[in-house]
Image (cartoon, helix red, strand yellow):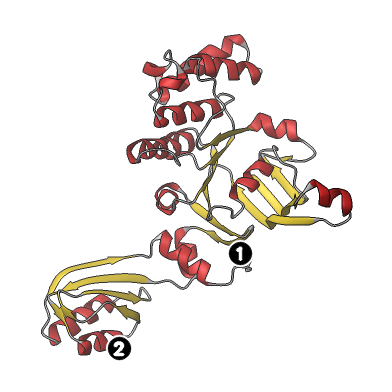
């Protein structure tokens, strides 16, 4: 079952230069296209990453899917409910967590905040306390629960934000830059909790919006790349590599590399590009199509040219390299 489906979902914001222009020229409307006819499917139980630079449309899309912003046109369905016609049903099925969370009451304790929001979410008194206690324990923040919220570190505040997002035991969780203000250790803890517990143990669906490519590469099963409000690529890492025709990368460190050696490596069947400079202590990057035998052939060329290998690493293209390749292509291409 699909947890999220959108069909040509679009959002335009009206731009107002001044109230004078509104009074004198009410028929003239300047708009900004934030999300442009975006069609997307996210499967149930999936950790899906939504990638894009700041202003690409990630937050606007999440706001529409979480019913906090009406779309201009198109259709969005979350957990089987239409986001425009059935917003109350959608809200009962989802949780929303944003980065740099500021909507907690800082003079209350963390526990008091969670109880307060559980009351707003209409949790009954007999299920509220056990739910709060279980989340505090699972997230490892029970020792801070009775301290004022304004004494917490950024990482602890973000864990409380995740706890609040899970109070209603949602089937689908929207995470908008959840690790943006965290230090590396706290960010790793949050990522691990998302992937191992929320998705792995509970089987929930997570839509993670981020511009941190290493974060998406580490925990997401599929990613979608948004540019100027349009979905320009979608798929697993392997699917995106094939689509962008990206093979494998061989990284060599040699004691020396001549121009002849680099030319001969470039002539090996399957090698697509050789970069790096000739000279002593040369680091070469050899891109090839992934076929077998290329590594052996390259190493034979190195030996024939009298160079010695100091280190040799073969790897697949990273998500950052895929992302750059997508952005170098046609930004208007809608992925199937």
Q: Which residue is mark 2?
A: 267
Q: On the picture, is 323 further left or further right than 290?
A: right
Q: Which residue is mark 1?
A: 335
Quick check: can you spot residue 60?
Answer: yes
- Residue visible at 53% across and 55% down in the picture: 52
Q: Is the residue 73 above or below the residue 83 in the image?
A: below
In primary-sequence order, the first of circles 2 and 1 is 2
> What is the crowding at mark 1: few (fewer than 14 residues within 10 Å), some, or many (at least 20)?
some
Q: On the picture, is 31 further left or further right than 254?
A: right
Q: Position of residue 336 (x, y in %)?
A: 63, 64
Q: Residue 119 falls in which quadrant of the image?
A: top right
- Residue visible at 65% across and 32% down in the picture: 93
Say whether marks 2 and 1 touch (CB < 8 Å). Answer: no
Q: Residue furthest front?
A: 20
SS for callout 1: loop
Q: Nearer the viewer, residue 103 or 208?
A: 103
Q: Position of residue 191 (x, y in %)?
A: 41, 40
Q: Residue 56 falls in which quadrant of the image?
A: bottom right
Q: Nearer the viewer, residue 239 or 309?
A: 309
Q: On the picture, is 20 further left or further right than 57?
A: right
- Residue visible at 35% across and 76% down in the picture: 288
Q: Nearer the viewer, residue 276 or 3?
A: 276
SS for callout 2: loop
Q: Position of residue 298 (x, y in %)?
A: 23, 80
Disc 2 from disc 1: Cα separation: 34 Å
Q: Position of residue 89 (x, y in %)?
A: 72, 32
């Amino acid at each position: 079952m699909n947890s999220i489906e959108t069909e040509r979902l679009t959002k335009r914001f009206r731009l107002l230069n001044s109230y004078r222009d509104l009074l004198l020229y009410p028929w003239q409307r300047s708009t900004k296209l934030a999300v442009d006819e975006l069609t997307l499917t996210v499967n149930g139980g999936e950790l899906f990453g939504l990638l894009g630079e700041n202003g690409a449309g990630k937050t606007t899309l999440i706001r529409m899917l979480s019913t906090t912003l009406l779309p201009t046109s198109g259709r969005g369905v979350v957990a089987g409910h239409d986001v425009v016609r059935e917003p109350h049903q959608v809200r009962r099925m989802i949780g929303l967590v944003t980065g740099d969370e500021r909507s907690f009451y800082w003079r209350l304790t963390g526990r008091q905040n969670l109880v307060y929001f559980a009351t707003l979410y209409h949790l009954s008194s007999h299920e509220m306390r056990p739910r709060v206690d279980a989340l505090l324990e699972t997230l490892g923040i029970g020792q801070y629960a009775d301290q004022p919220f304004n004494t917490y570190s950024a990482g602890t505040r973000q864990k409380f934000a995740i706890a609040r997002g899970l109070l209603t035991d949602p089937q689908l969780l929207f995470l908008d830059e959840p690790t943006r203000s965290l230090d590396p250790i706290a960010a790793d803890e949050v990522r691990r909790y998302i992937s191992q517990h929320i998705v792995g143990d509970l089987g929930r669906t997570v839509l993670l919006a981020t511009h941190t490519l290493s974060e998406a590469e580490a925990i997401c099963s599929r990613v979608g790349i948004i540019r100027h409000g349009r979905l320009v690529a979608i798929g697993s890492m392997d699917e995106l590599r094939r689509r962008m025709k990206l093979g494998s990368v061989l990284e060599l460190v040699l004691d020396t590399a001549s121009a002849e050696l680099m030319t001969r490596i470039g002539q090996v069947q399957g090698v697509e590009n050789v970069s790096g400079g000739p000279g002593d202590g040369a680091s070469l990057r050899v891109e090839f199509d992934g076929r077998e035998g290329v590594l052996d052939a390259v190493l034979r060329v190195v030996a024939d040219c009298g160079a010695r290998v100091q280190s040799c690493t073969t790897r697949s293209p990273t998500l950052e390299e895929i992302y750059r390749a997508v952005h170098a292509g046609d930004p208007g291409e809608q992925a199937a």
